Amino acid sequence: MNNIRLSVLDQSPVRKGVSASQAVQETVELAKLTDTLGYTRFWVSEHHNTGSLAGSTPEVLIAHLAGQTQNLRLGSGGVMLPNHSALKVAENFRMLEAMFPGRIDLGMGRAPGTDRLTASVLNPSNQFREQDFVEQLMDLQNYFHDAAETGPVAAKIRAIPQVDTVPGMWLLSSSGQSSLFAAHFGMGFSFAHFINPVGGAQAVELYRSRFQPSPDQAQPEANVAIFAFCSEDEEKVMQHQAVMDYRFLQFEKGGGINPLAYEDVKDAVYTAQDQERIRMNRRRMIVGTPEKMKAQITRLAETYAVDEVIIITIAEDFDDRLQSYRLLSEQFNLVAQPSALAH
């Protein structure tokens, strides 16, 4: 497959010995770098009640990042819609469109991005019902087009500021269920292979087959997101793999996501069951030297039949994180383009 576009999903990871403030500044520096390297999008995530990921308010961070960059599309990967009212999300992203027209993506997910207790505090009325999510999507489209359905309440409400442009709307999924919603509403679809390496290609295929054009999107558009780390130093690649193996297991066993360094995990002993989980989890990531990485990312894009792959890189050394994105840019011959051309 030729002309693969690369994008970024950044969660503002808090490295060992680093403050949350510094983690956010590292996200800013990464956005500035990838803006010049030819990446297409830069999405930031929403997580709550975890000390290891500093990204809790994508709409705030997007505004700052858009002002620090020129070429990237900036967006959420994603706004966890059940945590918010549809009106407030619409107003947040209309304001972003007013400031940066044609550069904003609204990526949305159904998961809370946190534990159930925290989710209940974020939105006490959240019932985690599928129908509620569908109604929020309908409301969002109405708010973005000033097309509220008639009724005693909806007909009187407009999302402010009223602007002419609409953010690119994407549904994010790690199970495939949202592929049908994305197809029905005529939105983009992004599959989180970095969370679940099973069934994604089939979900994208189903999305394409069921896609119904919307006023904002005439054709289906899909991408896939993957953990990735690229280095010319094979020892660094091995150490990164070891840390990610341990991190995934730690999370699956209820240990949370804690900042780690290779020294913390190098002597870890794994059971046969652990080793089986490690083999499974390695399907969620691509690590290696530049040439190997290009081949594997290309193969992933071909499997999904997409021309865009979103890269998530968590590294123990910030310079290694930056260098990984540089090396991938070189391998795929990326060239910075005005963001309006990369909707």
Image: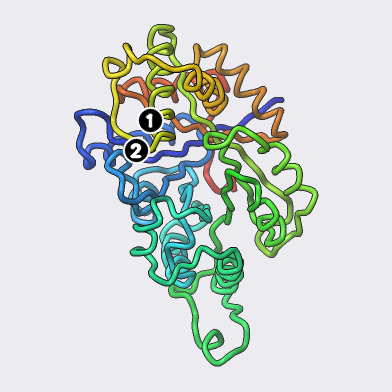
Quadrant where the N terminus is found in the figure: top right
Q: Residues within 10 Å of mark 1 (few under 14, many from 20)?
A: some
247 vs 176, left or right, is left
Q: Secondary structure at mark 1?
A: helix
224 or 26: nearer the viewer: 224
Res 257 → quadrant? top left
Can you identify the residue that label 2 sits on? 256
Res 313 → quadrant? top left
Residue 162 in percent (x, y) is at: 48, 74
305 or 160: nearer the viewer: 305
Residue 19 in percent (x, y) is at: 20, 37
Q: Which disc number belongs to residue 22?
A: none
Q: Residues within 10 Å of mark 2 (few under 14, many from 20)?
A: some
Residue 279 in percent (x, y) is at: 54, 20
Q: Residue at x 41, y 8 (%)?
A: 233
Q: Residue at x 60, y 32 (%)?
A: 197
Q: Residue at x 29, y 25 (%)?
A: 260
Residue 261 in percent (x, y) is at: 29, 21
303 vs 83, left or right, is right
Disc 1 or 2, which lies upstream in sequence?
Answer: 1
Verify CB contact (< 8 Å) between mark 1 and mark 2: yes
- Marks counted in the figure total 2
Q: Is residue 55 above or below residue 292?
A: below
Amino acid, disc 1 = Gln
Q: Which disc number belongs to residue 250?
A: 1
Amino acid, disc 2 = Gly
| Alpha carbons under labels 1 and 2: distance apart | 7 Å
